[in-house]
Image (cartoon, rainbow, N blue to C red):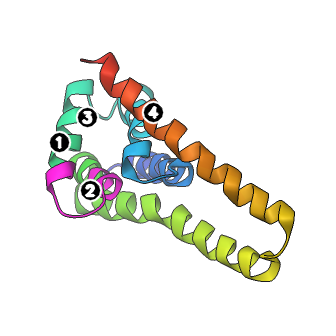
Amino acid sequence: MPDLMIILKLFTSFLVIGLFSFGGGYSSLSIMEDMMVNKYLFLSKTEFWQVVAIAQVTPGPIALNCATYIGAKKAGMLGAIVSTFSVIFMPILLSIILIYIYKISSKNDIIRDIFQNLQKMIPFLIILSLFSLARDV
């Protein structure tokens, strides 16, 4: 049985990664690297980028593949399941909430402005990931 604290750390860290990863998997890499390498010391920097390389060639979303692999490496099958669930839980929940908000207020100018501003954040997060990658080159 894996350590409950490791499972809890995997759950909370991938929940946060899923919550703040706008724009796809590549925008989540800098957040994921910070949490997995610097905060929880689950992986070395080299190991992390090896996981990313494996996740890129594996079918499916890169953030989901990374979460599953890291969870399995740290806590076996239960870790993989918890990490996979937690990285997708917040985006699914937020999507449901945003769809509901959009349906009830799609003609509201303020709501339309909020969605347009969220779209402007996506390139910034991708650029942040590129800077993180370039730092090590």
| Whole-number angstrom distance, CA of label 2 to CA of label 1 | 10 Å
* Of the image marks 1 and 4, the number of the one nearer the N terminus: 1
Q: Amino acid at mark 4?
A: Ile
Residue at horizontal 46%, vertical 54%?
A: 11
Q: Is residue 56 magenta?
A: yes
Q: Which disc number belongs to residue 127? A: 4
Label 2: state its secondary structure. helix
The kind of residue on which mark 1 rests is: Ala
Read off the residue under disc 3. 48
Which of disc 1 and disc 3 is earlier in sequence? 3
Identify the residue at image location x=38%, y=25%.
132
Q: Which three-letter amino acid code belongs to the residue tagged 3?
A: Phe
Image quadrant in which the C terminus is located: top left
For the residues marked 2 and 4, what is the alpha-carbon distance in whole angstroms?
21 Å
Identify the residue under disc 2: 65
Name which of mark 3 and mark 4 comes first in the sequence.
3
Is any part of residue 79 visible from this angle? yes
> Badge 1, how many Cα within 10 Å: few under 14, some, many 20+?
few
Q: Quadrant of residue 129?
A: top left
**Image depth: mark 1 or mark 4 in front:** 4
Counting from the top left corner in percent of width and height, residue 91 is at 53, 64
Q: What x and y, as percent, mark residue 67? A: 33, 52
Above/below status of 133 relative to 110: above
The span shown in magenta is 55-67
Q: Which residue is mark 1?
A: 53
> In x, y percent, where is residue 94?
61, 66
Q: Are marks 2 and 1 in contact (CB under 8 Å)?
A: no
